[in-house]
Image: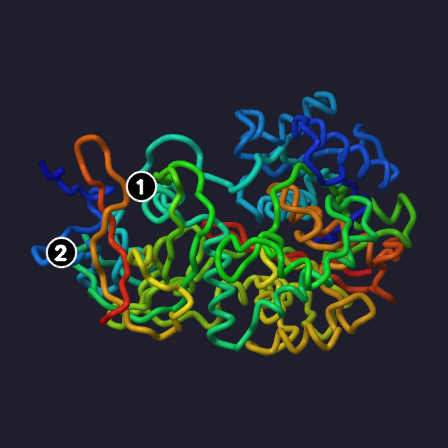
């Protein structure tokens, strides 16, 4: 199978800009093409992540962006996998290239997000777990983040001060990222004054919802070898889009109950562990090989869970790893050098693509003030609700 | 006149004569797995060829896996009152079923006094009222 490389990465800055997601998406797409030194006319396939809150054009994002960039007859795909949508779009583009049906593919994700809590789509749907958890329990996304955070406190003795330290770290990283929405350094005292949304999490522990867009130009190794600057080409070493293995006994959004383990053998790994494991297996790499990682910090506490899920440390040791400085810029394996969701807020279909844009920038050595020294291998990871895993490994 | 008490959504739980709650689940007659909500008629264990699920009631008590409180009104379709009253949410492990079930915490629960492993039991409480009915939901209450 052909190796697939990233030739270009582009973004529209995150924020609340009051425009259509199509505007953001075409800016990111054109930026990625310019970065690759290619034209829209060179693209043979477009894969997009869908957005659920922008009407029909959002459900057919692939054709929406193809129309915006100018119909050229190429095939498109539009995928939804919640927060993992971008990774599934990357995988669709990669598979198209690996199958030999395209040499160059464009991946785009863009969103225009509402203010405040994400709610379910309108209508009464008692059979929809996402409707049920809101109507019957009032269980918002931060409710689940708080349950995970409290679990860390109960299991491992984590404290809100540990969670605040994640925010302090990521806010420092984001200062150096022109695409980040929040570029402000937080102190522990400021965080302690932030209102509690869902105990133990405060407003600043929880990521905002943002507008934004990210795009990648992928190409076959053969095409890349004949074009462009080899020093800026980044290899896609793995894409993991795994689903859970039954019985999934860890509480996952938006379910109001887990699977029952009665009558079944527990899987070898938890769902979150399995997401990274599949990526490492494909890449033939392990956590010790990582130069940096972008993990999905929907909450500060969740970043600590991810350290363990991607094997940076054993369960219960994430707080110690954080305080050792290993995951800060200058440390052994900086995590969320981009500033993470703490500085971006979440633009759902763009976010997994944005994570990869950051890794590409890092391993190219083009990250400026947030550059990870000698970055060669980067891993991104996230999880979309309804059982979508997402992890990408890129290498120099 | 007392308004009738009606479950907020049909088929999730029933109120027993003593005012306690019974969660209505499905159970596979072949592999024994439980499913809550019952939702579908079939077993989701990929290693099981079991047929139609039996209708069963889940254990009425368990242990706290985790817990939180919500201090801001969720968006619709949560029937938040005005003024909004914060509420706790608990994730509870059921030993016999080997599963975790969410629920709000009973009114008056002091979240700051809870710890993982605490024993809790099911109760029925009002969630909101219409002109004609009291809509009820199951909640978890710390065992006395």
User: Residue at 77% across / 64% down in the picture?
Assistant: A377
Q: Is mark 1 on a helix, strand or loop?
A: loop
Instruction: State left or right for residue A252 relative to residue A114.
Output: left
Q: Are marks 1 and 2 on the same chain?
A: no
Q: For the residues marked 1 and 2, what is the alpha-carbon distance in whole angstroms?
A: 26 Å
Q: Indicate the position of residue B43 as horizontal and vertical percent values.
A: 27, 55
In the rendered structure, the residue with mark 1 lies on which chain? A
The quarter holding residue B100 reads bottom left
The quarter holding residue B135 reads top left
Circles 1, 2 touching at the beta carbon (< 8 Å): no
Q: Indicate the position of residue A86 as horizontal and vertical percent values.
A: 63, 45
Q: What element carries label 2?
A: loop
Instruction: State left or right for residue A325 relative to residue A164.
Output: right
Q: In this view, does A337 lie above or below A286?
A: above
Q: Indicate the position of residue B110 as horizontal and vertical percent values.
A: 36, 64
In which quadrant will I find the N terminus of chain A? bottom right
In which quadrant will I find the C terminus of chain A? bottom right
Instruction: State left or right for residue A262 relative to residue B67.
Output: left
Q: Nearer the viewer, residue A147 or A270?
A: A147
Q: Taking the image as drawn, is residue A134 in sight? A: yes
Q: Taking the image as drawn, is residue A390 in sight? A: no
Return the residue at label 2: B19
Q: Which colour scheme is used?
A: rainbow
Q: Indicate the position of residue A106 as horizontal and vertical percent values.
A: 72, 38
Q: In this view, does A209 lie above or below A293?
A: above
Return the residue at label 1: A127
Q: Residues within 10 Å of mark 1 (few under 14, many from 20)?
A: few
């Amino acid at each position: 199978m052909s190796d697939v490389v990233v030739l270009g990465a582009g973004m529209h800055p995150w924020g609340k800009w009051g425009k259509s997601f199509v505007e953001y998406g075409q800016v990111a797409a054109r930026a990625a093409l310019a970065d690759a030194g290619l034209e829209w006319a060179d693209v043979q396939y477009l894969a997009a992540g869908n957005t659920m809150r922008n009407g029909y054009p959002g459900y057919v994002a692939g054709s929406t962006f193809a129309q915006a960039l100018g119909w050229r007859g190429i095939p498109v795909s539009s995928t939804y996998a919640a927060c993992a949508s971008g990774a599934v779009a990357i995988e669709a583009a990669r598979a198209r290239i690996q199958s030999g049906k395209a040499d160059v593919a464009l991946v785009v994700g863009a969103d225009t997000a509402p203010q405040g809590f994400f709610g379910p789509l309108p209508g009464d749907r008692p059979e929809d777990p996402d409707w049920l958890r809101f109507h019957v329990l009032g269980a918002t996304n931060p409710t689940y983040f708080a349950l995970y955070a409290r679990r860390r406190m109960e299991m491992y003795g984590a404290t809100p001060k540990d969670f605040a330290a994640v925010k302090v770290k990521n806010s420092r990283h984001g200062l150096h990222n022109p695409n980040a929405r929040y570029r402000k350094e937080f102190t522990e005292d400021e965080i302690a004054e932030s209102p509690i949304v869902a105990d133990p999490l405060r407003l600043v522990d929880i990521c905002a919802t943002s507008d934004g867009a990210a795009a990648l130009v992928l190409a076959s190794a053969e095409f890349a070898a004949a074009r462009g600057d080899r020093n800026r080409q980044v290899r896609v070493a793995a894409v993991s889009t795994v689903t859970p293995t039954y019985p999934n006994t860890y509480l996952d959004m938006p379910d109001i109950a887990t699977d029952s383990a009665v009558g079944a053998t527990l899987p070898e790994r938890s769902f979150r562990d399995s997401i990274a494991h599949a990526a490492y297996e494909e890449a033939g790499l392990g956590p010790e090989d990582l130069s940096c990682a972008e993990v999905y910090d929907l909450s500060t506490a969740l970043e600590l869970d991810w350290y363990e899920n991607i094997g940076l440390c054993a369960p219960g040791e994430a707080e110690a790893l954080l305080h050792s400085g290993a995951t800060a810029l200058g440390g052994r394996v900086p995590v969320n050098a981009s500033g993470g969701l703490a500085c971006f807020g979440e633009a759902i279909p763009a976010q997994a693509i944005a994570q990869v844009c950051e890794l590409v920038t890092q391993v190219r050595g083009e990250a400026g003030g947030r550059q990870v020294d000698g970055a060669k291998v980067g891993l991104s990871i996230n999880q979309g609700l309804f059982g979508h895993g997402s992890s990408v490994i890129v290498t120099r | 006149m007392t308004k009738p008490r009606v479950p907020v959504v049909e088929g999730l739980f029933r109120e027993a004569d003593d005012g306690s709650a019974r969660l209505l689940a499905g159970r596979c007659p072949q592999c024994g797995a439980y499913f809550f909500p019952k939702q579908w008629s079939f077993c989701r264990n990929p290693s099981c060829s079991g047929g139609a699920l039996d209708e069963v009631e889940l254990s009425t008590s368990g242990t706290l896996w985790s817990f939180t409180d919500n201090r801001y009104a969720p968006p619709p379709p949560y029937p938040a009152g005005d003024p909004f009253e914060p509420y706790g949410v608990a994730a509870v492990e059921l030993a016999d079923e080997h599963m975790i079930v969410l629920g709000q915490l009973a009114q008056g629960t002091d979240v700051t006094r809870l710890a993982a492993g605490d024993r809790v039991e099911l109760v029925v409480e009002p969630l909101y009222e219409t002109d004609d009915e009291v809509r009820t939901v199951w909640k978890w209450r710390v065992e006395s």
